[in-house]
Amino acid sequence: MQNQTLIQFFHWYYNEEQNLWTKVAAEAGHLKEIGITALWLPPAYKSNNATYDVGYSVYDLFDLGEFDQKGSVNTKYGSKDEYIKAIETLHEHGIGALADVVFNHKAGGDELEKIAVKTVNPEDRNEFTSDVFEIEAWTKFTFPGRQGKYSQFIWNHECFSGVDWAEDIKQTAIYSIQNHLGEGFEEVPSTEFGNYDYLMYNDIDFRNRAVVEELKYWGEWIVETTKVDGFRLDAVKHINPDFIVEWIDHLNQKYNREFFIVAEDWNVVDVAGQLNYIEITGGRTQIFDSLLHHNFFLASKDESFDMRTIFDGTLVQVKPDLAVTFVDNHDSQPLQALESYVDFWFRPLAYAMILLRMQGIPCLFFPDLYGGIYDDKDREGDEVHVELVAIPAVETMSKIRTALAYGEQRDYFDHGVCVGWTRAGDEEHENSGLAVLLSTGEEGFKEMEIGKHFAGKTFVDALGYRQQEVIIDENGCAEFHCNAGSVSVWVLKVG
């Protein structure tokens, strides 16, 4: 069996001349060569601002770049035909496609409705701050450009639990919609702000059975239309988990398979919340290990960080079979909402820790392979120029993961700044086995055991940072080295 390796094949500011769906198809062969098994693709459906929006301001789930809506036929990433072609090309290379699914909210309604609301305390969403009154809000979605093709479902205020804009009085607030489903919000996994059901835009209400059935139908439609292999679920801590369970079970049962599903349950406080989500959803999804990302971020900012604790309190430590590990994503990149970008010097070290160990399924980030250059304003309103440079070691380690990162793992997390581990290899993968040593301080060295079956064999640093050769002794051990603030990956010298 080949190790699984994912890649988030976009970033927030993707702005290359080649549209993204075309780039996916063009890069499929290369991604296969470096060991990628599945691509997480950005939201493919029409957003509130068709050609510029990253995809999370969802307008029409059934418009994959096919209809003239919200200012364009195409989405930011291309047309429906190009999206389907990209997935077909991935499949030709044995690579899966994960569709990004945003079920929490809809944006860009087509018509105003008069609705009864109460205002809510933003710091405690269980507390109302007004009596019932009427506002006009963009809560009716008729999708005139699509004219009922694929689905004739019309969304109105009965489909939503809250909005954040009153058009008639031109005011922003959290407005709880007072409809037949209840005056308050749904119960969701996150208890931040009392109840974190409401996040943004028109908040979808899963207590409405017509909504649930429509989204189950859409799940069938997207699978049959695009042949996607799985899903990335956005913002699940804001969504009724009963719906998530029902939606997943419906698709798995209908198609008699288990789709690969990874959920974004962003948490950098403690792992208990993620374990609770796993419990209430019966382990139906993988979870992005945001806590490990946060540890990487902290370690990259503080060279005195105790590397013996780098995995402490992370999902990959306590539930490795359900952890998807990552260094950064579109939300944590510079100038974004959850900005916590791991410093460049530490990125190769972090990637070694997600790519070359047994635990977890790693997810690479597009700029680390392809780079990214963009401009945006910071929180103070100042224009900032950002250049994210590609890191060649990431591609090298991804190849090593595919070919060599197998077998028993021995850990040497026994020093505050210099840690390492070995993999003994297995019979299925020729020449497999490796030793990894990294240091966040000065030049590091450590004696580690890799296995007696390597006795007398010569190992070299596949990253090329260290030029010496290492010979394994009769006990299967050797002293391995790495440069200061660096990582070395020692593999069998062949040829």
Image (spheres, rainbow, N blue to C red):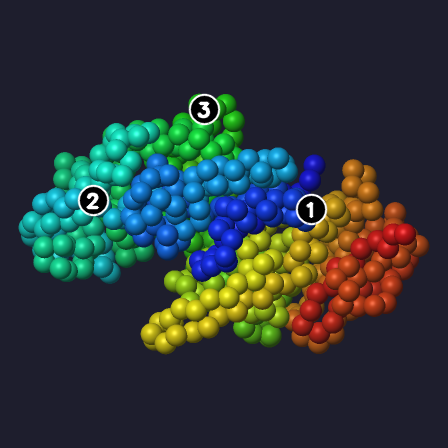
Which of the two residues, 241 or 229, is positioned nearer the viewer here?
229
How far apart marks 1 and 2 lie (CA) works out to 46 Å
Among numbered discs 3 and 2, the one appearing first in the sequence = 2
Residue that mark 3 sits on: 253
Q: Are marks 1 and 2 in contact (CB under 8 Å)?
A: no
Dividing the picture into quarters, in which one does residue 486 lie? bottom right
Between the residue at mark 3 and the residue at mark 2, the CA separation in whole angstroms equals 35 Å
At 65% from the left and 58% from the top, the residue drawn is 394
Give the mark nearest the N terminus, 3 or 1.
Answer: 1
**Mark 2 is on which residue type?**
Asp
Image quadrant assignment for residue 59? top left
Crowd around label 1: few <14 · some 14–19 · many ≥20 (10 Å): few
Judge left or right: residue 484 versus residue 156: right
Q: Nearer the viewer, mark 3 or mark 1?
A: 1
Q: Residue at x 42, y 46 (%)?
A: 43
* Up/down of 93 relative to 363, above or below: above
